[in-house]
Amino acid sequence: MTESGSLGVSAAGGAADASTRRGFISWLAVGWLAFAAGIGAFVTTMARFLFPNVLFEPPSSFKAGFPSDYQVGEVDERWKEKYQIWVVRNTEMTYALITVCTHLGCIPNWLAAQNKFKCPCHGSGYYRSGINFEGPTPRPLERAAISISPDDGQIFIEKARKFLYEKGQWTDPAASIKTT
Ligand code: FES
């Protein structure tokens, strides 16, 4: 073989080696990427396991300010979003209505101009007392326990203690506080 022939063979061999090396390196890179992706997926799974999706519900009892914070004749909506409660004050009493429609559980709206609660789902309507008068709901809204906190004089509402009109429970002393 001539010298130039041997150089040609050796150059071709070098090129083949380089190509094999590049192939090996790119497979190595793919391997590492796959490994890293696997580790990432594992860590994500573990993180979801350690920190599961927990629904943080607001406490079912809360202080709602002083009776004088509420206007006589108004349906107060300040606690609707956070605690699902309307506070209603009239000349005789203050009571807490739970903002859940007794038909299938939607959230009604207070329509001040029409002086009623109206459910957007199937049209049930309730007077400001909470008593139903239209639509498919079979019964009034529920009231929550309400009292004056002895330590600071604020209104204290307990949603876990419910009072049902149809069971004669709205006359329970814990179902309302007297307006003074
Ligand atoms: S859920 Fe309110 S009317 Fe049906």
Image (cartoon, grey):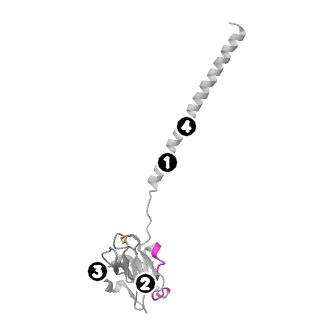
Q: Residue at x 72, y 11 (%)?
A: 4
Mark 1 or mark 3, which is nearer the start of the sequence? 1
Q: Nearer the viewer, mark 4 or mark 2?
A: 2
Cα separation, mark 1 vs mark 4, equals: 16 Å
Q: Which mark is residue 166?
A: 3
Question: What segment carries the magenta color?
Answer: 69-81
Mark 4 or mark 3, which is nearer the start of the sequence? 4
What residue is shown with label 4? 32
What residue is shown with label 2? 88
Count of marks, rendered view:
4
Cα separation, mark 4 vs mark 2, equals: 65 Å
Instruction: Specify whether 121 is left or right of 165.
Output: right
What residue is shown with label 1? 43
- Whole-percent x and y of residue 64? 46, 80
Say which amino acid is labelled 3. Answer: Glu
Cα separation, mark 3 vs mark 1, equals: 54 Å
**Ligand 1 shows up in which quadrant of the image?**
bottom left
Front residue of 157/103: it is 103
Cα separation, mark 2 vs mark 1, equals: 51 Å
